[in-house]
Amino acid sequence: PLLAATLLALPLTAGAALAQPQPLPIESTIPVAKDIPYPGTMKLIVDATDLDRRIMTVKQTIPVAGPGPMVLLYPEWLPGKHAPRGELEKVAGLKITAGGKTLVWRRDPVEVYALHIDVPAGAKQVELEFQFLSATATDQGRVVMTREMLNLQWNSTAFYPAGWFTRQIPVEATAVLPEGWGYGVALDVASKKGDTTTFKTVSFETLVDSPMFA
């Protein structure tokens, strides 16, 4: 009886082995970046006045070339870093619209720093609204916002379209600072009204490499 039970179990064991999950090739759905000019200038507004909660509120406008699938990337590999350390986990409340219509966004199943959207016909741009939740203690990451000073790292407060080199994507950035604050940044001022400063258009690559201290 023991031998018979063993023999009966052999086909089940072999079948179970064959039924185990098998690896599949990873299919990339991210457009390959090309070294050509992006058709339009992104506009980025960062409100860094919520010092008590240490939250930066972001509004961003990204022109689109036409309707259809579009991939937005959050900066992953950063100047001076040696690993993919973009703080995507601190992005909250993301809402994407086009022409007043809310768009559904889907995180890429392989590249977590990529979002997929479908641009509707007739849309000239997409609008993003979200918050960057600054670390409040060192065990959460680098503290970049306190009641006394802040370090506005533009890469933490912007997405960009996949398919273009970042040096080919122009962006006009605006910072809203607490009342009376001064700042230092390697960007030229285009206009200033009160505590709101708009900087001259630069490439997204240059913007990311130009952090502000205030």
Image (cartoon, rainbow, N blue to C red):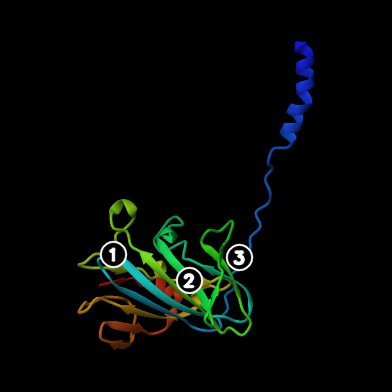
Q: Is residue 66 above or below residue 84?
A: below
Amino acid on which the number 3 mark rests in the picture: Ile
Residue 79: x and y in percent read: 41, 64
Could you tell whether 47 is left or right of 30 in the image?
Answer: left
Amino acid on which the number 1 mark rests in the picture: Arg
Q: Quadrant of residue 109?
A: bottom right
Query: Residue at 57% across / 80% down in the picture?
Result: 64
Q: Are marks 3 and 1 in contact (CB under 8 Å)?
A: no
At numbered mark 3, what does the secondary structure look like: helix, strand or loop?
loop
Q: CA distance from mark 2 to mark 1?
A: 20 Å
Q: CA distance from mark 3 to mark 1?
A: 35 Å
What label sits on residue 95 in the rendered view? 2
Q: What is the crowding at mark 1: few (fewer than 14 residues within 10 Å), some, or many (at least 20)?
A: some
Q: Quadrant of residue 199?
A: bottom left
Pick whichever of labels 3 and 1 is earlier in the sequence: 3
What label sits on residue 53 in the rendered view? 1
At numbered mark 2, what does the secondary structure look like: helix, strand or loop?
strand
Q: Residue furthest front?
A: 101
Query: Residue at 54% across / 64% down in the picture?
Result: 114
Q: Which residue is mark 3?
A: 30
Residue 11: x and y in percent read: 79, 26
Pick whichever of labels 2 and 1 is earlier in the sequence: 1
Query: Residue at 52% across / 76% down in the picture?
Result: 97
Q: Is residue 124 above or below residue 31?
A: below
Query: Residue at 49% across / 75% down in the picture?
Result: 167
Name the one closer to the observer, 105 or 135. Answer: 105
Tell how many labels. Answer: 3
Pick whichever of labels 3 and 2 is earlier in the sequence: 3
Quadrant position of the N terminus in the picture: top right
Residue 151: x and y in percent read: 29, 68
Amino acid on which the number 2 mark rests in the picture: Lys
